[in-house]
Each structure stands twice: as C-alpha cells, then as structure tokens.
C-alpha cells in the first residue's frame, strides 16, 4: 500500500503484514520515517506516480494538499488497483461533490463512515468505545459531523474488503 503524505509513517505500525511505502514532501518527515525503518519516498502527492501499481492508497489528514482535486483523484485511480482511503472534513468540503469526483476518476463506489477517533493521541478504552458507538449512531453521528469530526472515505473497485 502507498501512504500519501505519510508524515513519519506512524500509520505503518497499525498495518502489519502489508508491504508499506510512504510518500511525503518534507525531507525531515522522510528522515523520521526512515529512522523508524520504513520505506518512504520524498515527493509531492500532486505529481507522484509509483513505479508499479499499488493495491491500496491512503491519504490521511492531507487531502487538502491536492492542488487540483479532480486531477489528483484521477492520478490515484490510475495507479491504485483496489482501494483508496482518505479522511474528509464535511465542513470543509461538500461530501457529495468529492464522492462524485472520486467515482468520475474511475472507482466503482465510495463508502463513508463517521470517524470520531482522534488521529494524534489514544483515548482511554471506555471513551474510545463510546465514540465508536456514536460513530454508528446514524442521525446523531450526522449531527455531530456538522460541528466536529470527519468521515473516513473508502473508494474501491469490486467489493469493499
Ligand atoms: C497533518 S500531516 C499528516 C501525516 C500523516 N498522514 C498522519 O495522518 O499522521 C500532513 C503531512 O503532509 C505532508 N505534505 C504536505 N504537502 C504535501 C505534498 N504536496 N505532497 C506530499 N506530502 C505533503 C507534510 O509534510 C506532512 O507530513
């Protein structure tokens, strides 16, 4: 999998068993990721193309670095065989527009899930469980998303696995 704007590649620790390659535009971040023993490339997500197709691409807390979102999604769809996962702030973007752009880029479907877990620190188990339940609460989750939190978006070809 290719992790665009990977930062120090901390996400790789949560993805055992996957062949992970990161990309980041900051030389300091690339160095930090390499010190963690990760394979990371210095580059810009706006024009990067891996040397061979990848099964999955992720882009967390960084979709806003795409200068031309439509072109970015098209480029990702060209080299991603199965799945593209990213997070989306619904107060910053019109979710329907972004989903339409992702489908137009070549993915068959897009699924959205409210995502309430903090991305920078861990919570006590009880708080994490409560947030997890709230993510699945339908209308309450949608109301909370008008004030805070993000969606996790999975664009995919074939079945969502
Ligand atoms: C908020 S951090 C997110 C890091 C990681 N994805 C995470 O969720 O912890 C944003 C990262 O995007 C990188 N970045 C900014 N512009 C970029 C670009 N055009 N191409 C690739 N990486 C970029 C920054 O260097 C930074 O490491």
Image: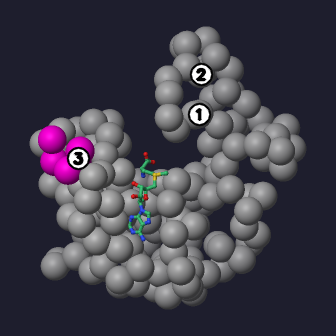
Front label number (1 vs 3): 3
> Which disc number belongs to residue 128?
2
The residue identified by callout 3 is 33
Precedes in sequence: disc 3 or disc 2: 3
Assign ligand 1 to one image quadrant: bottom left
**Could you say whether the residue bearing mark 3 is in a helix, strand or loop?**
helix
Q: Could you say which is closer to the camera, residue 96 or residue 87?
A: 87
**Could you say whether the residue bearing mark 1 is in a helix, strand or loop?**
loop
Residue situated furthest front in the rendering: 28
- What is the C-alpha distance between the residues marked 1 and 2? 7 Å
Q: Could you say which is closer to the camera, residue 33 or residue 77?
A: 33
Front label number (3 vs 2): 3
In the rendering, at what x and y percent does residue 161 appear?
A: 41, 54
- In the figure, 94 relative to 140: above or below? below
Q: Residue at x 23, y 46 (%)?
A: 33
Q: Is residue 149 magenta?
A: no
- In the figure, 43 relative to 40: above or below? below
């Amino acid at each position: 999998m290719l992790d665009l704007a990977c930062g120090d590649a901390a996400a790789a620790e949560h993805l055992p068993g996957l062949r992970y390659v990161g990309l980041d535009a900051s030389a300091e971040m690339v160095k930090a990721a390499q010190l963690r023993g990760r394979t990371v490339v210095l580059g810009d997500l706006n024009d990067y193309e891996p040397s061979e197709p990848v099964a999955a691409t992720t882009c967390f807390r960084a979709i806003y670095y795409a200068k031309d979102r439509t072109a970015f999604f098209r480029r990702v769809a060209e080299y991603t065989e199965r799945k593209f996962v990213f997070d989306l702030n619904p107060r910053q973007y019109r979710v329907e527009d972004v989903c339409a752009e992702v489908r137009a880029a070549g993915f068959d479907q897009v699924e959205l899930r409210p995502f309430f877990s903090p991305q920078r620190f861990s919570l006590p188990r009880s708080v994490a469980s409560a947030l997890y339940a709230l993510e699945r609460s339908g209308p309450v989750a949608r109301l909370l998303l008008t004030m805070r939190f993000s969606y996790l978006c999975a664009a995919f070809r074939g079945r969502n696995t």
